Image (spheres, helix red, strand yellow):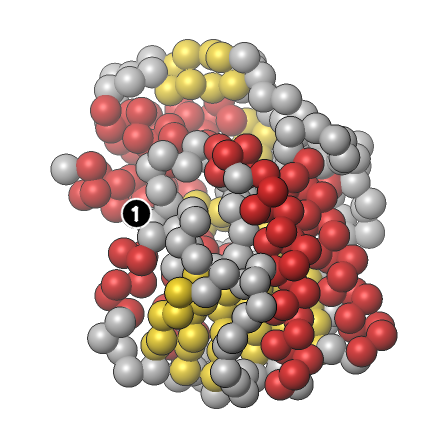
């Protein structure tokens, strides 16, 4: 995969998703600057990249006045807490990442005439009344609920990105990312798949919220970052859904993880989370049409890779 970008900035570059994107960009021949304040990420995620001469790790809070010397050809804005456990712990920081952080990253792109890609989220759809979710659906979000610090931060980031495109001509694209999983997720970040895998490997009960019939669509990380790069290479302003349209219940995902780990753990139902979406599944027609992108890695392939990584870490 040849690069059309000489130099790339990835905010949140030491995070789970950011580290995989940095790796892909390097593999295409780009020079990569990863900026991160390490609030929810881990420098160990990119430790293996530090020996590559075209990779640079910068300790930088993108919500402050960024000092990121360019020029850059592309700016990927991924900096934000992404798991409920993190954004419940860091509510104001999460809002700042979506507001000030997005503005600073957009300013860098405007300064350099760079393509800008915002990593937004399926959470902008809230608890959707439309199924599957298309990009023209406006969503059903509780603006004052506990999850709103993340949902509304991303909705504001999309509005700001769109305004910068209209008013200042910044070359922007918006990706709405659905549940993504894979190696380098934090075992303690509270998201469904790392939580279930950690519990299964420890022999603890898998804690399924509610009755487990709520649905999710899980996409392996390699597919997601490939979609982000495809969006960057395109002229599409988005928003574009990036996710796997195979809809699964949370209970089914828990059962699959038990099967892959060989764990004898039981499934335990706990209280449902506040404002937890009942159904979540992307319509990816636009991604197919505009980006030529579809997910390629099945759960049967992705889950064993992820479990193996966690097993090595826990051992």
Callout 1: SS = helix
In this rendering, the count of numbered labels is: 1
Question: Badge 1: how crowded within 10 Å, few (<14), some, or many (20+)?
Answer: some
Q: Which sits in the foreground, 219 or 35? A: 35
**How far across and down, in percent of the image, does residue 144 sit?**
74, 31
Q: Residue 151: where, in percent of width, then height?
A: 68, 42
Q: Residue furthest right?
A: 167
Image coordinates of residue 23 in percent, x first then y, are: 37, 68
Is residue 261 positioned above or below 8 on the image? Answer: above
Image quarter where the C terminus lies is: top left
Can you tell which quarter of the image residue 45 is in?
bottom left
Q: Residue at x 42, y 18 (%)?
A: 207
Spot occupied by residue 119 in the image (x, y as percentages of width and height): 60, 58
195 left or right of 48 in image: right
In the current view of this chain or complex, which residue is farthest to the left? Answer: 315
Residue 22 in view (yes/no):
no
Q: Which residue is mark 1?
A: 305
Q: Residue at x 40, y 54 (%)?
A: 38
Q: Residue furthest front?
A: 65
* Location of residue 249 with respect to 1 vertically, above or below: above
Q: Residue at x 68, y 36 (%)?
A: 148
* Horizontal side of residue 53 vs 37, given as left or right: left
Please name whichever residue, 145 or 280, is drawn nearer the observer in this view of the structure. Answer: 145
């Amino acid at each position: 995969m040849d690069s059309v970008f000489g130099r790339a900035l990835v905010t949140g570059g030491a995070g789970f998703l950011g580290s995989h994107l940095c790796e892909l960009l390097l593999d295409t021949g780009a020079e990569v600057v990863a900026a991160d304040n390490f609030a929810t990420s881990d420098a160990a995620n990119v430790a293996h990249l530090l020996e590559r001469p075209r990779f640079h790790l910068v300790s930088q809070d993108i919500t402050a006045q960024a000092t990121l010397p360019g020029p850059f050809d592309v700016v990927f804005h991924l900096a934000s807490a992404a798991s409920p456990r993190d954004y419940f712990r860091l509510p104001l920081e999460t809002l700042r990442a979506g507001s000030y952080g997005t503005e600073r990253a957009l300013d860098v792109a405007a300064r350099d005439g760079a393509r800008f890609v915002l990593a937004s989220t399926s959470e902008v759809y809230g608890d959707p009344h439309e199924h599957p979710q298309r990009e023209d659906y406006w969503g059903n979000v509780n603006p004052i609920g506990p999850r709103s610090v993340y949902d509304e931060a991303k909705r504001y980031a999309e509005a700001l990105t769109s305004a910068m495109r209209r008013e200042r001509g910044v070359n922007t694209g918006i990706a709405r990312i659905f549940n993504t999983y894979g190696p380098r997720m934090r075992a303690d970040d509270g998201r469904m798949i790392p939580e279930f895998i950690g519990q299964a490997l420890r022999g603890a009960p898998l804690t399924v919220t509610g009755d487990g019939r709520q649905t999710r669509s899980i996409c392996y990380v390699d597919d997601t970052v490939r979609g982000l790069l495809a969006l960057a290479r395109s002229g599409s302003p988005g928003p574009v859904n990036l996710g796997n349209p195979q809809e699964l219940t949370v209970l089914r995902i828990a059962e699959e993880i038990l099967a892959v780990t060989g764990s004898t753990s039981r499934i335990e139902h706990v209280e449902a989370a506040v404002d937890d979406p009942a159904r979540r599944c992307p319509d990816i027609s636009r991604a197919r049409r505009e980006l030529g992108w579809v997910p390629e890695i099945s759960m049967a392939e992705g889950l064993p890779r992820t479990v193996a990584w966690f097993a090595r870490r826990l051992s």
